[in-house]
Image (cartoon, rainbow, N blue to C red):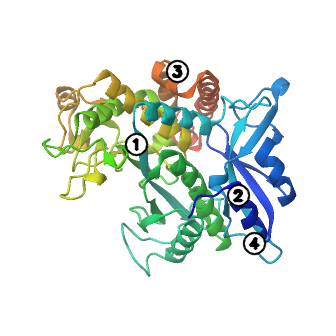
Amino acid sequence: MPAMTKEAVLKAVRDNNVKFIRLWFTDILGVLKSFAISPKELEGAFSEGMGFDGSSIQGFARIDESDMVAMPDVSTFTLLPWRSTETGSVARMFTDVRNPDGTPYEGDPRYVLKKQLDRAAKMGYAMYVGPELEFFYFKNSEGTEYLDRGGYFDLTPLDVASDLRRDTIIALEKMGIDVEYSHHEVAPSQHEIDLRYKDALQMADAAMTYRLTVKEIAMKYGVYATFMPKPVFGENGSGMHTHQSLFKGKKNVFFDAKDQWGLSAEGKCYIAGLLKHAPEFCSIIAQWVNSYKRLVPGYEAPVYVAWARRNRSALVRVPMYKPGKELATRCELRCPDPACNPYLAFAVMLAAGLKGMEEKYELAAPVEEDIFEMTPKELKKHKIRALPGSLGEAVEMTAKSDLVKECLGDHVFEKFVENKRIEWDAFRIHVSQWEQDRYLSIL
């Protein structure tokens, strides 16, 4: 899709009979927010932004400082292909949230990511990201009745969701989001559509668009799509394995042909940064109580802090180098889930990697054995730590992290920690059906 300008947007609105333009932004939890304007408001939106009340948005302004301004990012203009065009089209643009005086709003997750990308740019780097977002299709939002009993890479007739994936991919590509491939995942009714790598800010926008598109297309078919990390006991949860690399111009900074693993010194330090700080930022990339029902051994979810090339039980995987594929050298962080806020998730990953490069962290040797099968003694021998085992543990590690606080900024950091502590307390005091079934008749 060609780069959009204000003039090009105005022309596209006229040419496509656009009746409404939806302005999108996210709260600190990654929940998509939106309001619509008419075409006649566009000129003013481009020059002055559109005011809105931020006091009801999670993590935004207090009631006594509620005025916010949404400034449209013209480069993100696109038509929404799932909306009917009989009475006119609907378009969307992502916005940057600003204070009334025009300064960036510290509570805007998009701004948090932009700050980290600017920091990397000053060091000469651009971050590219390719996430793999998994999800489930269910009959409706009231339960977990499967659409199929397919397994990994299964095709029809087991995989009855092929048409849903096809229509989702068509919709994404109409919006300029490139898809690499799609397939059935391991669990029944679980699916994956992988997006072709992009600049991290573009990819965060794409990930937000992807999640809504998957849900919208599912609704058109009368079914429900969810990115809940672990919706079904005993089945694999949904992850967001995040491939990432740094470039200087057209050069992949992570690649070194002379290294035994094909990794440069910078690439090793970046990976060491991810490994060292992963427990601290775990609550950002796995931010819900339910996230930690996925992050347990035995379900292909990595919980042990180590790296490898072939071993998928490791937290970070470095795909094997293929001659002529230098640009594809990357690391894959395997613990994030698709229900996180992608702006904050990419920001903390980058912050950790850059910290490793700045401080020249040393990367330990890869661990190619199945870590899930290791005894506590073997884990200790390899100096392998585990990720936090619950949201409560994770958020308290985040609360002590200087790296995460510096990355997110005081406002987002404090609001996020406060929100997650409230969520954990609500879960901690809840008496579940499991407890009643297990204890009521014997205690």
Task: Report the side of 128 relative to 419 (left or right).
Answer: left
Placement of 23 over or under 136, stated as above or below: above
Distance of label 1 from label 4 (alpha carbons): 44 Å
* Badge 1 or badge 2: first in the primary sequence: 2
The residue carrying mark 3 is 399
| Residue 142 image point, x, y percent | 66, 59
* Badge 1 or badge 3: first in the primary sequence: 1
Placement of 411 over or under 15, stated as above or below: above
Q: Residues within 10 Å of mark 4 (few under 14, many from 20)?
A: few
Distance of label 3 from label 2 (alpha carbons): 35 Å
Distance of label 1 from label 3 (alpha carbons): 19 Å
| Residue 147 image point, x, y percent | 53, 71
| Residue 381 image point, x, y percent | 16, 27
* Closer to viewer: mark 1 or mark 2: 2
Distance of label 3 from label 4 (alpha carbons): 50 Å
The residue carrying mark 2 is 92
Task: Report the side of 233 relative to 25 (left or right).
Answer: left
Residue lying farthest to the right in this orientation: 40
Placement of 255 over or under 283, stated as above or below: below
The residue depicted at 28 percent of the width and 25 percent of the height is 361
The residue carrying mark 1 is 335
**Amino acid carrying mark 1 in the image:** Cys
The residue carrying mark 4 is 15
